[in-house]
Image (cartoon, helix red, strand yellow):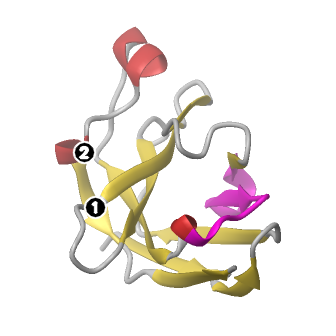
């Protein structure tokens, strides 16, 4: 049974930093996508960053480029989202999600589409005050 557990959320002032963790269990596939998404009540879910574990390719939303960094530690089956220079508009519930096994150069170049993420964590709240 695939499980994803997020941690690391909290409340910070604008300009501060947080590091979110997504610890996975229950799977052995080696090439897949892990994505971070955020949800604000009344707004559509937004993909923030993702990583294709097959080659380490990373992808970012324009709104977070240069401020957020996604990385993986295969030894502990964990993907991190380092968030720096946080802004009030970064506030939201952050979820990590995993695709099923994916392979090929397509994913190295483009990552996974949102509908390919089929396993989701429970979320961790991030609140950035001005």
The quarter of the picture where the N terminus appears is bottom left
Q: Residue furthest bottom?
A: 11
x, y percent for residue 87: 66, 65
The image quarter containing residue 93 is bottom left
The reply to whether dot 2 and dot 1 touch (C-beta < 8 Å) is yes
Q: Residue furthest right?
A: 16
Q: Which residue is nearer to you in this view: 84 or 99? A: 84
The quarter of the picture where the C terminus appears is bottom right
Give the magenta-colored segment's residue range.
Answer: 71-88
Q: Is 16 covered by the magenta stretch?
A: no
x, y percent for residue 85: 78, 58
The image quarter containing residue 106 is top left
Q: Is residue 69 above or below residue 22?
A: above
User: Which mark's residue is nearer the viewer, 2 or 1?
Assistant: 1
Q: Which numbered tag is attached to residue 89? A: none
Q: Secondary structure at mark 1?
A: loop
Residue beneath label 1, please? 45
Q: Is 79 covered by the magenta stretch?
A: yes
The image quarter containing residue 78 is bottom right
Please count the marks in the image: 2
């Amino acid at each position: 049974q695939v499980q994803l557990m997020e941690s690391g959320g909290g409340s910070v002032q604008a300009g501060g930093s947080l590091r979110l963790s997504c610890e996975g269990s229950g799977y052995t596939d080696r090439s897949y996508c892990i994505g971070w998404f955020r949800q604000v009540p009344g707004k559509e879910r937004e993909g923030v960053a993702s990583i294709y574990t097959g080659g380490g390719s990373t992808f970012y939303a324009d709104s977070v480029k240069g401020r957020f960094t996604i990385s993986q530690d295969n030894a502990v089956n964990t993907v991190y989202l380092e968030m720096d220079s946080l802004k009030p508009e970064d506030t939201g519930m952050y979820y990590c999600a995993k695709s099923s096994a994916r392979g090929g150069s397509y994913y190295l170049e483009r990552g996974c589409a949102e509908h390919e993420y089929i396993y989701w964590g429970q979320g961790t709240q991030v609140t950035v005050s001005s």
